Image: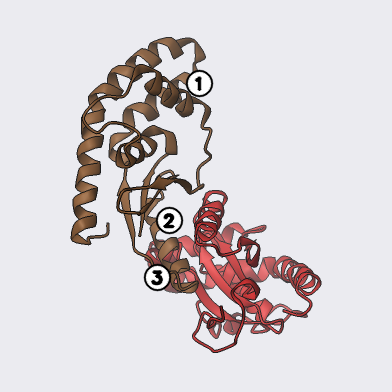
Chain colours: A brown, B red
């Protein structure tokens, strides 16, 4: 089984949620400031282009965890994966977890900083605050994803 | 590992030799269908087909919005390559790596998955007709407009398909 976290861009929220899933980030504790800053830099550089399915690792149930940035086309990506899965006889369940609703702040701040580099220091500070506020919601979403996976519900 | 072809035909292809070609466009209803039909000989190479000839082409002006992103089987050409059509809206630059990376993650060689953009030189009338037919469901208005536009651009599609077939025959001489 594969678990795919998807969102507008990989770095905004999908990466963070996948990191919680894999235990790279502690579920109950906001990551260290250095980790937050690394993620902010990823947001700015768009180091992983949209459309690349990136392998993050195996979780404790031996499920492969991936992240992908796909803009607002998550539905089409799901259909493509379903269609190509049938075509190539890939009989594997995929649990999709939409990180989109929890990435708005990062998206706006990264976009502003890219367009107006002078405000980057302010945007960075706001990002850190936003990250600390959104982090419990990411953890909750990942937990919900786990529950869905246990129940066998695919989104 | 011997596996069956896409349509369940026992062709005995090895997984690595199972080449598939996807003509893609915005909605997967007009230009990609035209190119696939030319490729498979359903539409002529040497002349511009009459409007009613398009009616007999399967999938022409029929792809629904809900099917965008889903490959539709069209046929198998003389080289044994399966031809599909698919609609990617205007995000083919994102969707192609998305699909190829997924196939790579499943150990399927992406070099055997070929994508050809059929949205070359789209006539604006085709776009208007496609919008009327597929989005507004005004088929009686949109369908003739798409045919009119496609017929205007038909030589371009023929040229594209000819180049594709030439490349395929060089690349897969024994496919």
Which residue lies at the image location 60% right of the left edge and 75% below the top edge?
A: B83
Tell me whether circle 3 and circle 1 mark residues in contact (CB < 8 Å): no
Q: Earlier in the sequence, mark 3 or mark 2?
A: 2
Q: Earlier in the sequence, mark 3 or mark 1?
A: 3
On the image, the x and y values in percent for residue B121 come to 67, 57
On the image, the x and y values in percent for residue A67 come to 42, 45
Q: Are marks 3 and 1 on the same chain?
A: yes
Which numbered tag is attached to residue A115?
A: 1
The crowding category of the residue bearing disc 2, from other C-alpha atoms within 10 Å (few below 14, some 14 to 19, many at least 20), is many
Q: Mark 2 sits on what residue?
A: A77
Which residue lies at the image location 46% right of the left edge and 70% below the top edge?
A: B141
Instruction: Report how far apart the C-alphas of labels 3 and 2 lie in the structure.
Output: 17 Å
Q: Quadrant of residue A62?
A: bottom left
**Residue B60 visible in this rendered orientation of the protein:** no
Which residue lies at the image location 22% right of the left edge and 62% below the top edge?
A: A152
Which residue lies at the image location 60% right of the left edge and 80% below the top edge?
A: B51
Which numbered tag is attached to residue B27?
A: none
């Amino acid at each position: 089984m594969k678990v795919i976290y998807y969102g507008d861009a990989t770095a905004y929220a999908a990466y963070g949620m996948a990191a919680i899933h894999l235990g790279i980030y502690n579920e109950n504790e906001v990551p260290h400031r250095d980790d937050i800053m690394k993620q902010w830099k990823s947001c700015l550089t768009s180091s992983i282009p949209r459309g690349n399915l990136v392998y993050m690792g195996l979780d404790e149930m031996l499920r492969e965890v991936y992240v992908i940035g796909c803009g607002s086309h998550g539905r089409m990506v799901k259909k493509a994966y379903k269609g190509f899965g049938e075509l190539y006889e890939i009989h594997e369940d995929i649990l999709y977890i939409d990180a989109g609703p929890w990435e708005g702040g990062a998206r706006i701040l990264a976009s502003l900083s890219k367009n107006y580099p002078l405000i980057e220091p302010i945007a960075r500070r706001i990002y850190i605050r936003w990250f600390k506020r959104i982090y419990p919601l990411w953890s909750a979403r990942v937990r919900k994803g786990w529950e869905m996976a246990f129940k066998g519900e695919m989104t | 590992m011997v596996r069956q072809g896409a349509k369940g035909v026992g062709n005995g292809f090895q997984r690595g030799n199972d080449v598939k070609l996807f003509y893609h466009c915005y909605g997967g209803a007009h230009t990609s269908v035209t190119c696939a039909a030319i490729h498979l000989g359903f539409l002529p190479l040497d002349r511009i087909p009459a409007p009613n000839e398009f009616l007999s082409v399967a999938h022409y002006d029929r792809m629904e919005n809900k099917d965008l992103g889903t490959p539709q089987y069209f046929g198998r050409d003389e080289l044994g390559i399966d031809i599909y059509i698919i609609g990617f809206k205007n995000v083919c630059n994102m969707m192609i790596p998305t699909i190829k990376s997924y196939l790579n993650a499943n150990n399927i060689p992406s070099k055997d998955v070929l994508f050809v953009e059929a949205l070359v030189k789209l006539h604006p009338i085709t776009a208007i007709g496609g919008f009327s037919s597929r989005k507004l469901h005004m088929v009686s208005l949109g369908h003739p407009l798409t045919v009119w536009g496609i017929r205007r651009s038909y030589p371009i599609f023929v040229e594209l398909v000819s180049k594709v077939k030439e490349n395929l025959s060089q690349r897969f001489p024994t496919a």
